[in-house]
Image (cartoon, rainbow, N blue to C red):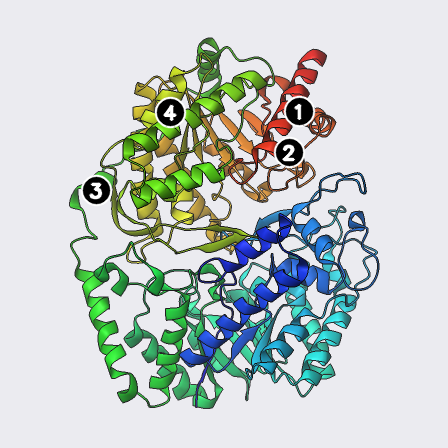
């Protein structure tokens, strides 16, 4: 019989129960014991849900209070010295300090958070492990065992999930950039042996080792590391079955290394790596089970059961049913929890979709059919076939006018009228900015009052006129604060926006928003990606009235704030019936229209954010050029239809840009702002070796931490920046938007930032 399995379940809870619990703990409203009790309730509900759906291999240790990679760092004792954590179990407060930093107090100095970046090509952020040449790993957390035993006590046999040791090291960083982290593999495997032995002793039959790094372009040395690691783990624990899970892409040149692993199971992603199947079926070792990632773990569209069942039958015909696992393509961490909670979607739209709860049912259905149970699920198969046909033929999806406009784009539409030096002169005449101009990235705190007003408007308790008056007052408060603080280029603060993508999606034809489709972004931060289901059209301007109102309040320039086409694409659930490049081009034309309307309204500084450009890179380097060509073109289509005197900005968040800096330069934004502070200024090394031709704002303080940044910290970063970036092209700004912060953190930090800029002006 084939086995139904799951690789991981969303940890936030159907109603974001984990978010509220963790934030209550941070606010001092509950203690650690209550936090753990609430977390246990979330875990139990998810295990029960999967068991009732018909999943045989239910994951454990896929849960985390903040991040599973951070959990791994704690487990193996990779706790940086600055957190002053004694030997033994790592405290909850140290754990959260590693994730979020810690503000200075009378009892202890402040400490910055660890670096955060994107998990492969997803919008999930993980905490980057910090290691060094002298790193000594030791077991400092038994969380995988504890949660296995917790499920066992509930009568549920689970398959514990661990980040694999090779992927963990390849994702880590060191102050010594010449250091190869794989030199630490033997010591790290010692700790993994320890934790796997404890799991085996506790009764675990299978353990899932996530090694998504096998979907990357690897060197021979890196590939050989997998063989060394699993040879040791398998020989040390012959009674424990190990499943190595590879996802987010195909294996290609890594196929031989993956097939040579001395393990009992291999998971492959057949949504993004379909081409692997026949090769693996022909070469898979005798007795090794194959986990088929047939259900898309990263999107919300219903699985075509007829097609996937045919694939499963093909695999079973070669290997036999007993060696087949049916699974999602990857962890369902990247999916919303439950489609049944949706109120915004009509029945036809819902019939096309599946969230995590529905996806595990799809896994169970495929398994039932493969095991000869077609009659038992005949109704589900018929409903699925009807939904597939409905979506293919629906007139809601296709708009001939949009398709015709996209097809008529010309090369001239992606080029500014003049080169940057000429544009800079025209912009200086209009804007008259000082040296080291200061600005913010766009958003200001979304206070409880703002969220309450938005909810009241949505419930009909506030009229549209009352809500808009409230928003105008919030904008005016933001403008006055910025004027008093001395910022040079202001923003309106975005109080009207629920999210930088969803806000725009709600105003575009071809998009639909959910009411409860939350997905974890990092820690307690969840986002609600809108869904692109059809061709994209802008019925009316989306931001012009609010930005023009803010500009009317001040003589200082106010930035128009837009989200770029690549980020709109990456941070949405995207239709899968046409190339992503075509959907992105439709978005670019929508943003181009909005940029033009802002310029005609008198807005002379416009920012089109593209924080997701780097995350959109294919995992294989050999696929990068094709992606970067259309991604950069789409950004330029969106931003090039303006006069020379209109200054175009963009912003990018946490990511390594070394390898694509030439493409970033090719975007030809007049000003680019980027994360810099949490990575300890390593971005500057990129600009040292690859000078950026236009203006740059390397972030001078970390907005993902509640710490109030001090003037001297920012001054130090700016002085380092001046050594790399010509002073006349250097901007001063935070790392990212301030939406998630509180005003009592934002106000002093921005005042210190302005003071730091003024210090440099005095020295220049």
Q: Mark on residue 752? A: 1
Mark 4 surroundings within 10 Å by alpha-carbon count, few (fewer than 14), some (14 through 19), many (20 or more)? many
Residue 334, x across and y down, in percent: 46, 59
- Mark 3 to mark 2 CA distance (whole Å): 42 Å
Residue 90, x across and y down, in percent: 76, 60
In the rendered structure, which disc, 4 or 2, sits on the residue that comes first in sequence? 4
Query: In the drawing, does residue 563 fall left or right of residue 41?
Result: left
- Mark 1 to mark 2 CA distance (whole Å): 10 Å
In the rendered structure, which disc, 1 or 3, sits on the residue that comes first in sequence? 3
Mark 3 surroundings within 10 Å by alpha-carbon count, few (fewer than 14), some (14 through 19), many (20 or more)? some
Quadrant of the drawing holding the C terminus: top right
- Mark 1 to mark 4 CA distance (whole Å): 26 Å
Label 1 or label 3, whichever lies nearer to me, is 1
- The residue at which mark 3 appears reads as 402
Label 1 or label 2, whichever lies nearer to me, is 1
Identify the residue at horizontal 25%, vertical 37% (top origin): 538
């Amino acid at each position: 019989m084939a086995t139904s399995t799951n690789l991981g379940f969303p940890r936030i809870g159907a109603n974001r129960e984990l978010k509220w619990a963790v934030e209550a703990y941070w606010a001092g409203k509950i203690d650690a014991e209550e936090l753990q009790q609430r977390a246990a309730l979330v875990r139990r509900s998810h295990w029960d849900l999967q068991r009732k759906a018909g999943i045989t291999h239910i994951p454990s240790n896929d849960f985390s209070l903040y991040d599973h990679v951070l959990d791994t760092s704690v487990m193996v004792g990779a706790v940086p010295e600055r957190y002053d954590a004694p030997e033994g179990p790592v405290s909850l407060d140290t754990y959260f300090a590693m994730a979020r930093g810690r503000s200075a107090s009378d009892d202890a100095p402040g400490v910055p958070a660890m670096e955060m970046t994107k998990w492969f090509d997803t919008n999930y952020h993980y905490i980057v492990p910090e290691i060094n040449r002298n790193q000594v790993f030791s077991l400092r957390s038994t969380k995988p065992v504890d949660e296995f035993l917790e499920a066992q006590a509930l009568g549920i046999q689970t398959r514990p999930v661990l980040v694999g040791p090779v992927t963990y090291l390849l994702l880590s960083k060191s102050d010594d950039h010449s250091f190869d982290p794989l030199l630490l593999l033997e010591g790290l495997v010692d700790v993994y042996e320890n934790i796997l032995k404890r799991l085996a002793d506790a009764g675990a039959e299978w353990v899932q080792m996530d090694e998504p790094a096998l979907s990357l372009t690897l060197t021979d040395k890196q590939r050989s590391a997998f063989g060394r690691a699993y040879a040791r783990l398998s020989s040390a624990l012959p009674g424990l079955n190990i499943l190595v899970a590879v996802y987010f892409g195909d294996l290609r040149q890594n196929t031989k290394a993956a097939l040579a692993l001395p393990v009992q199971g291999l998971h492959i992603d057949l949504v993004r790596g379909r081409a692997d199947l026949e090769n693996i079926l022909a070469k898979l070792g005798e007795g090794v089970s194959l986990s088929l990632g047939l259900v898309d773990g990263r999107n919300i569209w219903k699985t075509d059961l007829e097609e996937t069942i045919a694939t499963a039958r093909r695999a079973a015909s070669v290997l036999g049913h007993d060696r087949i696992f049916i699974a999602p393509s990857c962890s369902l961490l990247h999916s919303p929890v439950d489609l049944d909670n949706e109120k915004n979607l009509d029945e036809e739209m819902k019939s096309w979709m599946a969230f995590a709860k529905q996806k595990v049912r799809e896994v169970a259905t495929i398994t039932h059919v493969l095991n000869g149970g077609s009659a038992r699920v005949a109704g589900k198969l018929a409903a699925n076939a009807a939904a597939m046909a409905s979506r293919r033929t629906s007139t809601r999806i296709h708009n001939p006018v949009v398709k015709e406009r996209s097809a008529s784009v010309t090369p001239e539409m992606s080029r500014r009228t003049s080169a940057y030096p000429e544009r800079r002169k025209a912009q200086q005449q209009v804007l008259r900015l000082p040296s080291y101009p200061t600005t913010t990235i766009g958003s200001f705190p979304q206070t409880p009052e703002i969220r309450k007003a938005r909810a009241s408007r949505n419930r009909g308790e506030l009229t549209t006129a009352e809500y808009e008056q409230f928003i105008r007052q919030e904008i005016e408060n933001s403008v006055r604060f910025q004027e008093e603080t001395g910022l040079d280029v202001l923003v309106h603060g975005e109080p009207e926006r629920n999210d930088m993508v969803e806000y725009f999606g709600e105003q575009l034809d071809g998009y639909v928003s959910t009411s409860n489709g939350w997905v974890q972004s990092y820690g307690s931060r969840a986002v609600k990606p809108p869904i692109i289901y059809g061709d994209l059209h802008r019925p009316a301007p989306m931001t012009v009235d609010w930005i023009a109102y803010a500009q009317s309040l001040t003589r200082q320039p106010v930035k128009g704030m837009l989200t770029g086409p690549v980020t709109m694409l990456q941070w949405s659930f995207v239709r899968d019936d046409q190339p992503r490049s075509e959907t992105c081009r439709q978005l670019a034309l929508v943003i181009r229209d909005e940029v033009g309307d802002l310029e005609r309204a008198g807005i002379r500084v416009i920012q089109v954010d593209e924080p997701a450009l780097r995350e959109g890179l294919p995992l294989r380097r050999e696929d990068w050029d094709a992606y970067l060509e259309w991604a950069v073109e789409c950004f330029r289509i969106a931003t090039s239809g303006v006069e020379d005197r209109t200054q175009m900005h963009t912003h990018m968040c946490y990511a390594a840009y070394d390898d694509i800096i030439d493409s970033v330069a090719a975007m030809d934004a007049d000003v680019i702002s980027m994360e810099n502070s949490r990575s300890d200024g390593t971005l500057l090394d990129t600009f040292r070796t690859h000078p950026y031709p236009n203006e740059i704002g390397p972030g001078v303080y970390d907005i993902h931490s509640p710490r109030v940044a001090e003037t001297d910290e920012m001054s130090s970063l700016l002085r380092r920046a001046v050594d790399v970036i010509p002073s006349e092209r250097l901007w001063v700004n935070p790392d990212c938007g301030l939406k998630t912060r509180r005003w009592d953190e934002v106000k002093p930090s921005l005042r210190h930032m302005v003071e730091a800029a003024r210090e440099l002006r005095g020295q220049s």
